[in-house]
Amino acid sequence: MTEDLGDRARSVIDANRYMALGTVDKAGRPWVSPVWFATEDYRNFHWVSSPDAKHSLNLAAHPEVAIAIYDSSVPVGGAQAAYMKGEAGELTGDDLVRGLEVFDRVSREDIGRGFGLEDVQGSALFRLYRATVSEHWVLVAGRDPERGSGVDRSEPVTL
């Protein structure tokens, strides 16, 4: 039976807690940062970062992002990955309140500590960010028994 590639992408996202977030600065120079993330719908990805972090400053200049989620601990040839692109930025107002509900849940599960408004606004060290994904892809290994072509490639999926 052929596995649904959307299910594969969701499985990769569910199994990992870090994503590689690609941004660009004002001059168009790329930067990639690992960030601990939370999602509940595979379209909106939330994380906390310092507003002074390079990727946070880059988002203020260019909201476009690329994201890769994968398990780097697997042996060579055993990787599964989900790739995405979209737009991201710091959350404020009602979006901040809704985003914190998502991030707080994962934070309590992962580290036993919640995040509230006092942790992400005013003089706090962190801000809450959200990437809204417009496109998803999944890695199809070249040796995949059903879809393999001899060369690893990405295929678009709908989540």
Image: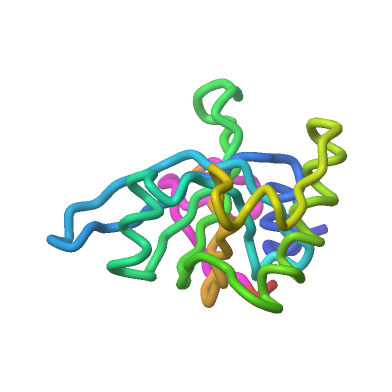
Magenta span covers which residues? 143-157
- Residue 102 rendering spot, x and y as whole percentages: 78, 60
- Judge by depth and name the residue closer to the eye, 156 or 113: 113
Can residue 3 be seen from the camera position used here?
Answer: no
- Judge by depth and name the residue closer to the eye, 60 or 20: 60
- The image shows residue 110, relative to residue 66, as above or below, that is above
- The image shows residue 107, relative to residue 6, as above or below, that is above
Is-magenta flag for residue 64? no
- Residue 143 rendering spot, x and y as whole percentages: 54, 41
- Judge by depth and name the residue closer to the eye, 135 or 61: 61
Residue at 67%, 48% (x, y): give it. Answer: 119
Left or right: residue 8 compared with residue 79 = right
- The image shows residue 77, relative to residue 135, as above or below, that is above
Where is residue 15, by image quadrant? Answer: top right
Q: How many marks?
A: 0
Residue at 51%, 63% (x, y): give it. Answer: 84
- Residue 129 rendering spot, x and y as whole percentages: 56, 60
